[in-house]
Image (tube, rainbow, N blue to C red):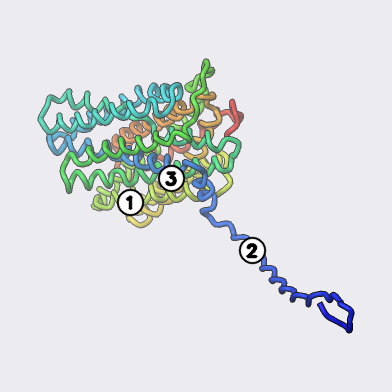
Amino acid sequence: MAVTGSTLVLAAPPASPVPPVPPVPARTPPRPAGPLDPYRRLFALPGTRGFTAGNLLARLPMGMFGVSAVMMIAGQRGSYALAGAVTATGLAATALVGPWTARLIDRHGQARIAVPATLIAFLGSLSLVVCVRTGAPAWTLFASYAATATTPNIGGMSRARWTHLLRGDSKAHHTAMSFEQAADELCFMLGPVLAAFLCSVVLPEAGTLTAAALLLAGMLVFTSCRATQPPVKAGPRHGSPLRALGPLLPLFLATGVVFGSMEIASIAHLSALGLGAASGPVLALQAAGSCAAGLLYGTMRPRGLRTCLVAMAAAMALPWLAASTGSLLPLACALLLAGMATAPTMVTSMSRVHALIPEGRLNEGMTLAVTAIFAGISLGAATAGTLVDRLGPATAYALPAAAAVLALAATKVVPVSSTRDVP
């Protein structure tokens, strides 16, 4: 306001300074995709880390029980024949009971069936320890170990959860199945090592007791994650998993023969070379190759089943050729490559199981596939042992190569279409 003579003049106030416009920050370029991004996205889903932690904890004992039982029974009773017979009985019981347990899980839900089934298996393990320790009759060992056949197929239940969560996202589902296969290899690689350490360094019963505790704790953690549990569908269930998987079961049987015969042939061959102490590390190298290949395969576009089997059949010929050199290094490299060829085959074939199984019966179908693999492992181990005795350990490497070719031939009858789409 200003005064001019007698006139009052209103003046505008001085203009306030205009604040400077802040510079526009430069747009940060997007972070390049890394090899682990598919797995980061996978475990960013709510609840996946919780059930995976329980899954791994409960899955590790699967590689411990057999070794622990053999070392405990043979150490206390002085008979490997008795120890082998007890574990063989347990495998046979699992082949019979496992699919029924899985069917109940599909029908009534994971938490409702898996927890009491695990408790029965837990008590069976404790009973085995007590019977061995107290010198109970041999039949009690068979009965106790047979009770562990109620152990649920934790890998199948975990895969069922991924299938439920990733419905409609085939790429993420492929990554999840690859992770599950890598987890299988990791647990079956570390389990026997941990069991052997506990039984030999701590006490003979430590392996079985630790495995039982891990199984129960892991299953409780896994089943407590209710939000990711697949819903139970009411109403009649149509379709037979056994009929749907009929064409795939010979493939799983032949793949099991590959696993079982390769292990026996490697142990026998290394022992014949005076390198028996290297058997554990060399077999662990094979499993590590499969584990790494499984994780890598999860970041790649899935291949066809026949393509994976062709690669596996070619890789299984490498140990046979390497054994003729009589050197450890070529054999170790060949087994590493052979192990890397098995993971893509297992991931792809398990994806076929998901596609072929009728709705609401996934756990039962997965358990049937695993049962066929275990049957093949037993058949392969027994046949390879016979070949070692009659034709020598190097010749026994022909068996996994032949079994891989048979697995490839079995795909001729595997349907290319499915009863439902893979998620």
Q: How crowded is the residue under tag 1: few (<14 C-alpha within 10 Å), some, or many (20+)?
A: many
- Residue type at mark 2: give it: Pro
The N terminus: image quadrant: bottom right
Compared with 318, 306 (above or below) is above
Q: What residue does disc 1 label?
A: 282
Q: Nearer the viewer, mark 2 or mark 1?
A: 2
Q: Position of residue 363 (x, y in %)?
A: 45, 28
Q: Which amino acid is tagged 1?
A: Val
In the current view of this chain or complex, which residue is farthest to the top? 236
Describe the element under mark 2 as helix, strand or loop.
Answer: loop
* Helix, strand or loop at mark 1: helix
List the residue tagged with mark 2.
29
Residue at the farthest left position: 135
Residue in front for this viewpoint, 405 or 56: 56
Name which quarter of the figure residue 397 lies in: top left
Query: What separation in Å lies between label 2 and label 3 (alpha carbons)?
Result: 33 Å
| Residue 255 in sight from this viewpoint | no
Q: Residue furthest bottom?
A: 5
What residue sits right under mark 3 in the picture?
A: 182
Name the residue located 55 percent from the left edge and 57 percent from the top edge: 34
Check disc 3 and give the amino acid type. Ala
> In the depicted view, which residue is nearer to us: 329 or 93?
93
In terms of sequence position, does the residue under pointer 2 or pointer 1 come before the other?
A: 2
Q: Earlier in the sequence, mark 1 or mark 3?
A: 3
Of circles 2 and 3, the one toward us is 2
